[in-house]
Amino acid sequence: MYKKKCSRNPSLKHLNTFAIDITAKKIVFVTTIQQLIEISKKCKLYNIPYIILGEASNILFLQNYTGVVIFNRIKGIKIIEQHDSWLLHVSSGEKWHNLVKLTLNLGIFGLENLAFIPGYIGSAAIQNIGAYGLEFKDICQYVEILSLKNCTKMKIYKKFCQFSYRNSIFKYKYENEYAIIKVGIKILKNWKPIILSSMKHYIQKKNINAYQIFNIICKIRKNKLPDPKKTGNAGSFFKNPIITQKKLKKLISLYKSIPYFPQKNSLVKISAGWLIDNYKFNNIHIGDASIYQKQKLILINKKNATPQDIIQLAKIIHSCILNKFHISLEPEIDFIGAFGKIKSLDVLNHKVY
């Protein structure tokens, strides 16, 4: 049977990387698809809200959750070798970083730029995780989902997943009645290193291999990001804004050093961290919520921050950046209210909560 925490209104403090001390009606860990179906059916039968999570590494609970928090621990990895590629069929309850390490140990190269990203496989698809020149969409073949209504499975192939910057169709259309149970990943054997300018400082040799890139990425991320085991955080709180060329020209005329990165459709991505850094917030904090000084995109819980502390800090940052740069920062993380997800911009724009 599925594992569960039976205490009444158990705390989620050690089960979310922001380390927010809120409770749920019940916490359940599922290890099979059948267990997931059973608990979701029970919740529907008794009209109890439920939410399915992996590591809870990209969310902020705003209030005590009135329903059941289901943690997906469905395991399984199948690897098929083809003439020119490797096909990986991975269950959604596997840890992402563990998959990266496994492929390297097997001599399968191509995931190393996505090393040390927290979370589970299912979340990687929902969020379209990305780092250092590679995104999940670049290696995704399909995402398999389970209907929690009629228990049927369906494969959504890459071209229908609507992947974009930290986004996918799974964030909205398939959010409530479906669960991701597996993803298909295709890794070409013709490996070529992806090396960004931010990595070159760490590179000593010309002929770099995948293992060295893996170690470099892990080193950069460990130096740059707070360890959630020591300091509560959910990684980047805000997305890097994507703006028009016209908007960029205005910004460059005022701030010549602003970093930017060309995107599709003549759009440009700029650094949200640079915007926050150049506002010079002067070590602002609300209670135990503050900006992480090594990486300004990250908001941290120094010890006992409440959701209200973090939201108030985020609202101040959002308002200040909007007033100075005329850019509305969009949260990268998901907000969970008492009954489920709440639209992030509704929270920051004072429409709810």
Image (cartoon, rainbow, N blue to C red):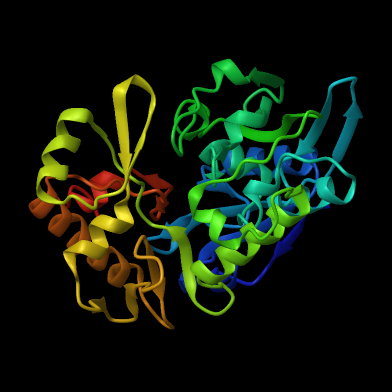
Q: Indicate whether 172 appears above or below 5.
A: above
Residue at 55% x, 55% y is 199
Q: Position of residue 158 (x, y in %)?
A: 61, 20
Q: Quadrant of residue 141?
A: top right
Q: Quadrant of residue 146?
A: top right
Q: Position of residue 256 (x, y in %)?
A: 18, 50
Q: Residue furthest front?
A: 206
Residue at 41% x, 82% y is 304
Tell me if 321 is positioned left or right of 196 in this view: left
Residue at 58% x, 30% y is 137
Tell me if 117 is positioned left or right of 172 in this view: right
Screen quadrant of the C terminus: bottom left
Q: Quadrant of residue 295?
A: bottom left
Frontmost residue, 222 versus 60:
222
Tell me if 302 is positioned left or right of 199 in this view: left
Mark yes or no: residue 225 visible.
no
Residue at 70% x, 35% y is 192
- Numbered label tally: 0
Tell me if 108 is positioned left or right of 315 in this view: right
Q: Indicate whether 265 appears above or below 337.
A: above
Mark yes or no: residue 293 visible.
yes
Q: Position of residue 287 (x, y in %)?
A: 28, 81
Q: Position of residue 319 (x, y in %)?
A: 14, 56
Q: Indicate whether 308 appears above or below 180.
A: below
